[in-house]
Structure formats: C-alpha cells, structure tokens
Amino acid sequence: MAKHMQHLKALREIAFDYGVGEHPDLATMARELSRTVYQNRHALDADLADLRLRNKGFERWFVAQRSKPDISVLVMAWPANYSSPIHDHDGLWGLELALHGALEVESWDRDENGKVLRMTGRDWLGPGDVSWFDADDRYAHRCRNLSRQETALTLHVYGGDLAQYFTYEEAGEAGQWSKSPQRSSIAGRLYA
C-alpha cells in the first residue's frame, strides 16, 4: 500500500489548509474536499482499488497527522452491508467524505454519562458527499455501508487523534444504554 497517490495528497492538503483553529470552518473544508472528489472520482477509484478489493472487513488506514493544530486524516473501508456500533469521537470535531460507494450516517445525541441516547438525524452520502460534526461531548453516530456487494470507502478528518472512544449498546431496559471503551486500530498507512 505504499503507492503514491496524488489525489489523496490533494485531499490531505485541503484538510490541513482548512483544519486550523479550535473551531475550523468545516463547511468550507467540506466544499473543497467534495469538489476535489467530484473532479477526480475515477482517478481516486483507481488509486484506492486495492482497498475496495481486499475483503478484510472494516479497516482504518492512516493517511496523515499534524500537530499545532491537531488534525488526523484517515481512509476507512466499509465491507458490504457493514454497520458500525453507535460511537462517539472523544469530543473531537470531525468530517466524513464518501469516496466510493454509499454510506448512511445516523446522528445521535447522548446525555453526559451515555445512558440515554436519542437519534437526531440521518444522512446518506455518495461519492463527494460530506457529513461533519463540531467538537461536542454529546455527539455520537452510527455508519452503515448501503451496498450488499461493494466495499465503500470514506475519508475522515478529525481535530486530533481518535485513539480511544466509546461505543453504545442498548441495555436491557428500553431507552437505556451502556457504553464500552474502545481503542482505535489502524490497518496500515497510505502514502500520499
């Protein structure tokens, strides 16, 4: 996976350029990333074909990280019909951009101790579509690949290193949730 990918490098540079300050302009970052994906969709598909064809399950691939301000860029591979658990982002801001395939993103609001969750919305992302969230300890979401045959690929930009987070699962009583600490795993590095 050490292949040089010029278009992935362009996405990384946009994330770094617009990911400044405590509350970056995520709408502008989203617009610029989306424009680049639309203009280079076929080249990105070719660059990332190995990830789509690996069939290794859900994987997170590290692209780049910067400090001052903290920002990390990853590509995620979502197997056909895969659904993540509801999870938070450790209070970080974040942006998710579909590169290949289609992803459903359910947004959830949770109380401060994670025992009560309420779904607040749902988005569907195709290539070039973006969803983002501000730094918020109450935000959580669940993502699902809408295809029954193809691996979906997404680009993720976070305001820091998402090394640990919590997942949420409905407890025995309706409307009550339990949370479990998780550690992020990285399948490898993509060189851009």
Image (cartoon, rainbow, N blue to C red):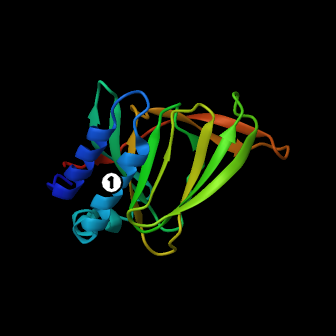
Q: Is residue 129 above or below residue 191?
A: below
Q: Residue at x 40, y 34 (%)?
A: 159
Looking at the image, which is closer to me, 144 or 23?
Answer: 23
Q: Quadrant of the N terminus?
A: bottom left
Q: Amino acid at mark 1?
A: Leu
Quick check: 57 left or right of 16? right
Secondary structure state at the residue bearing disc 1: helix
Q: Is residue 49 visible?
A: no
Q: Residue furthest top?
A: 68
The front one of 45 and 83 is 45
The residue sitting at the bottom extreme is: 149
As drawn, the residue found furthest toward the right would be 173
Q: How many marks?
A: 1
Label 1 crowd bin: few (<14), some (14–19), many (20+), radius 10 Å: many
Residue topped by disc 1 = 33
Q: Nearer the viewer, residue 58 or 14?
A: 14
Residue occupying image coordinates x 44% and y 51%: 96
